[in-house]
Amino acid sequence: MRIGIVGATGIVGRELVSLLATSKLKATELRLSATTRSVGKKVATHLGEQNIAELNVGFFSGLDLCFFCVSGGVSETWVPVAKAEKVLCIDNSSRYRMEADVPLVVPEVNGELLRGQPQIIANPNCIVSPLTVALNPIQLKFGLEDLCISTYQSVSGAGHEAMAQLETELTNYPGRLSQGQGQFLLNIIACIGSCDSRGHSQEEMKIIQETRKILDLPALPMAVTAVRVPVKRSHCQAVTFITKCRTSAEEIRQVLSAGDVRVSDVAPQPIAVQGTNQVYVGRIRENREHRPRSYSFWLAADNLRKGAALNALSIAEHWWALQ
Ligand SMILES: NC(=O)c1ccc[n+]([C@@H]2O[C@H](COP(=O)([O-])OP(=O)(O)OC[C@H]3O[C@@H](n4cnc5c(N)ncnc54)[C@H](OP(=O)(O)O)[C@@H]3O)[C@@H](O)[C@H]2O)c1
């Protein structure tokens, strides 16, 4: 299979290059691209060293599949070009996620959407893929009436420039830290992206809209607070939900353990889950001081794996298996 990656020098693109080495997708050719600044740079891949190529119409010619690991604006320019070349496009940006005719896919949850032979497939937000993996079996068995989430998102979720900023702050510490409002080290930023007139951040609205779309619950009441924390990699979530049917913390634990989630008594920590492929859930409990049928758990997953590159690759593997 001939595979392209646009944004191959970014934090998600690099993770994808490395995951392709052990993928069920057998790449016979790997074409990599980024900005003109990066053209000619060499990237180590399982097919040997590849040069970053210029991004133009010719880049897509003859590809079977292309991953887009770039911003929404860049995807908006180049996904239609790739589509016109009959290349399957798997887009990591938010640009196409809420388009009615574009499936937003977490294979364990709604992989059947790939049977429709879409030409553009959207990969969800880094919070939403792990979250829906955990919530889907609960929704199927007990029903979800209400959902409330607070996120604890690592700096790698903001891309390679943010990671470089954190490295600089770490190098300078304990000297002067002059990043002000945007400082990552020793700080918490409780607004990811700009806020709308009602006070919701862009990240919070993405999490709400995408979770509803994937779980096929368009009216699910949701409240989200999305927060950046001074952690390099892996995102955590405090998840509270009300079920429709009466259940127990133990039954929720059993349902999650039977599925695609690693369950533990303790809260999984970002440092322990980085570089792994699973979704981890711990501290499942009934909120006896809240409302009937109210439960909480703590979730952790690697934002660059299940939250981004791994889910994109898994979409491609499922799509290929259906060909
Ligand atoms: N990081 C995460 O945890 C995560 C999770 C889920 C989804 N996503 C989404 O995935 C996408 C990539 O995120 P990231 O974190 O990997 O960002 P990143 O580290 O900032 O990487 C951005 C990539 O895009 C390339 N690029 C920028 N402008 C371009 C242009 N005009 N033409 C071609 N290539 C261009 C960059 O190339 P240069 O190196 O040459 O500048 C780089 O390869 C974003 O849409 C992001 O929202 C990220």
Image (cartoon, rainbow, N blue to C red):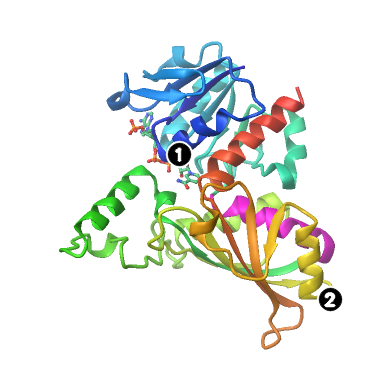
On screen, residue 82 versus residue 244, left or right, reads: left
Residue 69 at what x, y percent from top left? 47, 35
Q: What amino acid is labelled 2 in the image?
A: Arg
- Label 1 CB-ligand 1 distance < 8 A: yes
Q: Is residue 109 visible?
A: yes
Residue toward you, 272 or 110: 272
Residue 281 at what x, y percent from top left? 65, 63
On screen, residue 187 versus residue 287, left or right, reads: left
Crowd tier of the residue under label 2, counting other residues whose Cα lies within 10 Å: few below 14, some 14–19, many 20 or above: few
Q: From the image, state whether disc 2 or disc 1 is nearer to you.
A: 2
Label drawn at residue 263: none
What residue sits 51% from the left and 23% below the top? 46
Q: Is residue 240 visible?
A: no
Label drawn at residue 72: 1
Give the farthest residue toward the left.
Answer: 176
- Above or below, 260 against 85 in this view is below
User: Does residue 306 show up magenta in the picture?
Assistant: no
Residue 267 at what x, y percent from top left? 59, 68
On screen, residue 38 versus residue 207, left or right, reads: left
Q: Mark 2 vs mark 1: which is more N-terminal?
A: 1
What residue sits 53% from the left and 63% below the top? 269
Task: Identify the magenta region.
Answer: 126-143
What residue sits 23% from the left and 54% below the top? 171
Q: What amino acid is labelled 1 in the image?
A: Gly
- Above or below, 65 against 212 in this view is above
**Which residue is identified by label 2?**
246
Give the farthest residue toward the front.
Answer: 272
Q: Quadrant of the N terminus?
A: top right
